[in-house]
């Protein structure tokens, strides 16, 4: 079994408007995932340092960040980062340049999780529907031209329409895990965060609803358990 999760951690700023990375790490530990795609993992201005100090991750969690190229001081690429358990092997990784009206990106990593090789793709798409469509096509094109692997794509897609826009583009190639509504933590009205997959068998999925998660960000984390189809 492989557990993945996606979390827009809002730079570790909670619904109380306080930056509290320890609280964010508490939520990450609750998820108990093998692979976590983070959005808004780095501060937006200045040196764009990580919102999760390295020593806190090392001392208080089982996770380490995938060392992406093109990083500017934080753990991510335009805020997108991938965390893995320390026993997960990182076979390859990349930061993707995608069309964007504002700084946006996507990240990918080929990972060996308990003997199974998977590709994880993390993303945070634009607020504009036009740019989301361009970004989804760019990400799909990148994945299509790489060696085929069981793949999980996840992140904050910012898509409010249930079946339209970029969701339609992704659905031609990937199945969606029905995780449920993850935004807003105070009132769950939209499934902005998504997990999509191919080459894997979905076992279970959902939204993480702990008290800590309800305070730590305006998005709730989502998760999914997969079994290999081999």
Image (spheres, grey):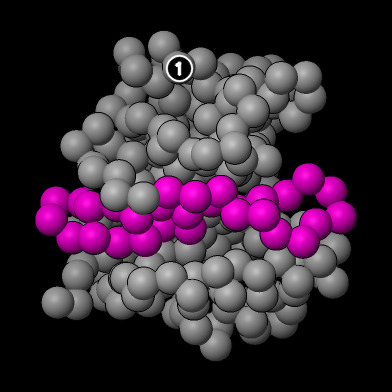
Regarding mark 1 in the picture, which secondary structure is present there?
helix
Q: Residue at x 22, y 52 (%)?
A: 112
Q: How many marks?
A: 1
- 104 and 203: which is toward the camera: 104
- Which residue is at a point 60% across and 67% down the rendered structure image? 139
Q: Residue 178 in magenta?
A: no
Instruction: List the residue tagged with mark 1.
Output: 54
**Drawn side of residue 184 relative to residue 214, left or right:** right
Q: In this rendering, is residue 109 above or below 130?
A: above
Range of magenta residues: 93-121
**The C terminus lies in quadrant:** bottom left
- Residue 214: percent from left, percent from top: 56, 36
The N terminus - image quarter: bottom left
114 up-or-down from 169: above or below: above
Residue at x 78% of width, y 19% of height: 46
Residue 98 shown in magenta: yes
| Image quadrant in which you'd find residue 118 | bottom left
The secondary structure making up most of the magenta span is strand
Q: Quadrant of residue 65?
A: top left
Q: Position of residue 220 (x, y in %)?
A: 55, 45
Residue 189 falls in which quadrant of the image?
Answer: bottom right
| Residue 125 in picture, x, y percent from top left | 70, 58
């Amino acid at each position: 079994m492989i557990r993945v999760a996606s979390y827009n951690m809002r730079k570790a700023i909670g619904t109380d408007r306080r930056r509290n990375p320890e609280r964010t790490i508490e939520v990450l530990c609750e998820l108990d995932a093998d692979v976590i795609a983070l959005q808004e993992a780095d501060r937006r201005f200045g040196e764009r340092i990580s919102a999760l100090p390295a020593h806190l991750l090392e001392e208080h969690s089982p996770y380490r960040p995938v060392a992406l190229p093109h990083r500017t001081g934080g753990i991510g690429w335009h805020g997108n980062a991938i965390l893995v358990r320390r026993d997960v092997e990182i076979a390859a990784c990349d930061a993707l340049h995608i069309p964007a009206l504002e700084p946006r990106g996507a990240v990918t990593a080929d990972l060996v999780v308990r003997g199974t090789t998977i590709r994880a793709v993390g993303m945070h798409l634009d607020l504009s529907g036009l740019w989301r469509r361009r970004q989804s096509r760019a990400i799909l094109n990148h994945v299509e031209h790489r060696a085929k692997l069981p793949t999980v794509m996840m992140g904050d897609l910012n898509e409010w329409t249930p079946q339209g826009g970029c969701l339609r583009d992704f659905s031609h190639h990937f199945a969606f895990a029905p995780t449920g509504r993850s935004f807003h933590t105070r009132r769950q009205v939209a499934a902005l965060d998504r997990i999509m997959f191919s080459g894997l068998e979905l076992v279970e999925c959902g939204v993480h609803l702990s008290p800590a998660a309800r305070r730590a960000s305006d998005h709730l984390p989502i998760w999914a358990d997969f079994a290999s189809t081999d």
